[in-house]
């Protein structure tokens, strides 16, 4: 599940800081500083967003379907579906191709974007006080408008019988018409371990605003969630989770429903 190796770009001259195009310089700066990325309120596929964990298994092929619905009391509702295919290249890096389908209000749905996602494991699981990873994404939109780079840390901490995850994403537009702003959003979940077929917990999602003006236009939502895993013959597994979220602030969806199903194949 789950951000990506450095976003690729093509150079027509030897690589020097002066020879890079403006979009390429922005991407490079984002990757090096892990701090350039803005929130796009028009990204309807956000209804199917997920919480990522800093875990990777080498040789694992993953097929994932996510869906979500968001109800806005003072605006059009949104629904989205996301399908992705990923592969564990090493035990420290998983890369994924992601296709997003979304719709707003009563309009017909359409393919919204294609993403290249990567998850990097930065610490050995369980060795330190907290497990740390990195998510890196490049999103190409099919609509008129700029693409987007997203980068942020993935945090995981075991607390007794529970596992807590927290993601932050910095978001920055690149290309023609791109904004100079960098936005910040977050996701979190808390899962109580028990019967692996059905575990209980909670999830939350929100936007924190634009860097330099955090708190302006922010919104937050949270609610109960369920998690589970079904083991198949051999090492294959099916994982699933779902959540019902309520808006906790103005600007948030009044209610949201999301689900995620993964088939992990070896």
Image: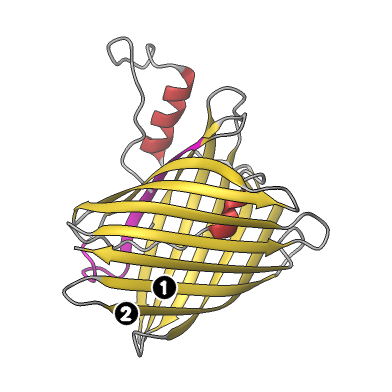
Residue 231 occupies quadrant: bottom left
- Identify the mark at residue 240; answer none if there is no mark: 1
Local crowd size for mark 1, using a 10 Å CA cut-off: few (<14), some (14–19), many (≥20): some
- Identify the mark at residue 230; answer none if there is no mark: 2
Tag 2 or tag 1, which sits nearer the N-term?
Answer: 2
- Please say whether residue 33 is one of the residues in the magenta stretch: no
Q: Is residue 92 above or below residue 232?
A: above
Question: Under tag 2, what secondary structure?
Answer: strand
Magenta range is 124-140
Q: In which quadrant of the rendered image does the N terminus lie?
A: bottom left
Q: Position of residue 135 (x, y in %)?
A: 38, 50
Q: Position of residue 263 (x, y in %)?
A: 32, 66
Q: Is residue 145 above or below residue 256?
A: above
**Extreme residue toward the front, this view:** 108
* Front in this rendered view, residue 165 or 213: 165
- Answer whether labels 1 and 2 touch (C-beta < 8 Å): yes
Q: Is residue 192 above or below residue 243?
A: below
Marks 1 and 2 sit apart, C-alpha to C-alpha, by 9 Å
Q: Is residue 48 visible?
A: yes
- Please say whether residue 125 is one of the residues in the magenta stretch: yes
Q: Residue at x 55, y 74 (%)?
A: 243
């Amino acid at each position: 599940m789950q951000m990506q190796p450095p976003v690729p770009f093509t150079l027509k001259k030897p690589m020097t800081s002066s020879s890079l195009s403006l979009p390429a310089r922005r991407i490079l700066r984002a990757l090096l500083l892990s701090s350039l990325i803005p929130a796009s309120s028009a990204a309807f596929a956000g209804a199917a967003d997920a919480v990522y964990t800093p875990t990777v298994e080498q040789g694992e092929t993953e097929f994932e379907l996510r869906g979500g619905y968001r109800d806005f009391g003072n605006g059009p509702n949104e629904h989205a579906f996301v399908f992705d295919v990923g592969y564990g290249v090493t035990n420290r890096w998983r890369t994924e191709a992601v296709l997003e389908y979304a719709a707003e209000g009563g309009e017909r749905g359409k393919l919204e974007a294609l993403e290249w996602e990567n998850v990097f494991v930065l610490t050995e699981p369980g060795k330190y006080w907290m497990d740390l990873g990195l998510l890196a994404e490049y999103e190409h939109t099919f609509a008129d408008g700029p693409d987007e780079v997203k980068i942020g840390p993935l945090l995981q901490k075991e607390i007794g019988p529970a596992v807590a995850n927290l993601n932050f994403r910095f978001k920055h537009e690149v290309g023609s018409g791109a904004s100079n702003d960098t936005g910040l959003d977050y996701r979190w979940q808390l899962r109580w371990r028990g019967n692996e077929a059905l575990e209980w917990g909670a999830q939350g999602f929100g936007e924190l605003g634009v860097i330099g003006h955090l708190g302006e236009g922010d919104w937050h939502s949270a609610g109960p969630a369920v998690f589970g895993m079904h083991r198949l013959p051999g090492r294959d597994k099916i994982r699933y989770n779902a959540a019902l979220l309520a808006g906790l602030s103005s600007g948030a969806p009044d209610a949201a429903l999301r689900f995620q199903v993964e088939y992990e194949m070896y």
